[in-house]
Image: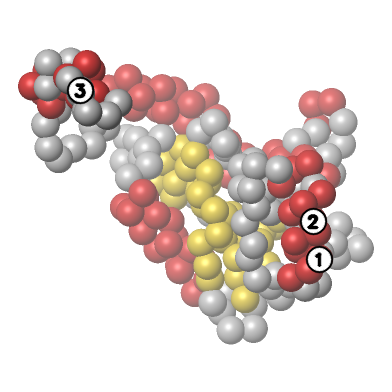
Amino acid sequence: KPRFGGSSIGIEIADDVDAARALAATSVHLRTGAVVEPYRPELVDLNIAFRTYPTLEITQLEKPLRGAAGSALYSYAEKYLAGGAGSDAGLTSAPREFPANVPEAVHAQARALAERVAEVTRLTSIVRVDLLLDEKTGELFVNEVNSIPGALSLYLWAPQQPAATVLLDALTEARDRRVVFPQAGFGGGAALRAAGGIAGKLVGLDGPRA
């Protein structure tokens, strides 16, 4: 898959290392680098979302539905074009099970993973967590985390909150809860001022001086 980008654009399945290297050398999507991952055709896509204002809240679990042909990947076309054209196009109207028809234990684990993602990443506002489920073993993996602007996921909130409320709360949080991460060492340019500016830090980099 491309090192940069998203929405399944440029992702290819390679049968062996030689094929992967050939794709990396020829695909326009892989010019800036590629990420190689094991292909797990038995895994099923699941999505869940959380928001962090006014308190941590988590949606129900969604299962996107692939095309009748059972494509090898959940493709861009299935994500964004399957719902139709015009106002019906996009991920909002893509085929899905919502809530997902999976065991309650999977729902509980998905909620727990969403809470863990919120804790570890410290992401705020509206965040969608993409999961992968092995239906035979029950293993559930966090595959990808999508924050704004990567995803709004308003369709996941429909049973719980009106879209306008979710958006207004996100804007309120952005205004009132600016998250500042602590940094070690000198801040505010103290080290640069102590060196007498950029010129002082560059002394000696151009070789010995007379």
Q: Position of residue 14 (x, y in %)?
A: 79, 66
Q: Secondary structure at mark 3?
A: loop
Task: Report the residue that reaches farthest toward the left.
Answer: 194
Alpha-carbon span between mark 2 and mark 3 = 51 Å
Q: Quadrant of the C terminus?
A: top left
Question: Farthest front residue?
Answer: 210
Residue plotted at (62% across, 76% down): 134
Q: Is residue 57 left or right of residue 62?
A: left
Q: Nearer the viewer, residue 36 or 178?
A: 36
Quarter of image, res 190: top left
Left or right, 180 with respect to 61, comes to: left
Distance Cα–Cα, label 1 vs label 3: 54 Å
- The secondary structure type at the circle numbered 2 is helix
Q: Is residue 138 left or right of residue 19?
A: left
Question: Circle 1 sits on which residue?
Answer: 19
**Which label number is shown at residue 209?**
3
Q: Nearer the viewer, mark 1 or mark 3?
A: 3
The front one of 200 and 16 is: 200
Is 125 drawn above or below residue 74 in the view shown? above
Cα–Cα span, label 2 and label 1: 6 Å
The image quadrant of residue 103 is bottom right
Cβ atoms under marks 2 and 1 closer than 8 Å: yes
Q: Return the residue nearer the eye: 161 or 65.
A: 65
Residue at point 52% right, 67% down?
Answer: 141
Q: Are marks 2 and 3 in contact (CB under 8 Å)?
A: no
> Type of residue at label 3?
Arg
In this rendered view, identify the residue nearer to me: 4 or 88. 4
Q: Residue 23 shows which numbered tag?
A: 2
- Residue at figure coordinates x 53%, y 44% from the top left: 146
Residue 29 x, y percent position in the rendering:
74, 43
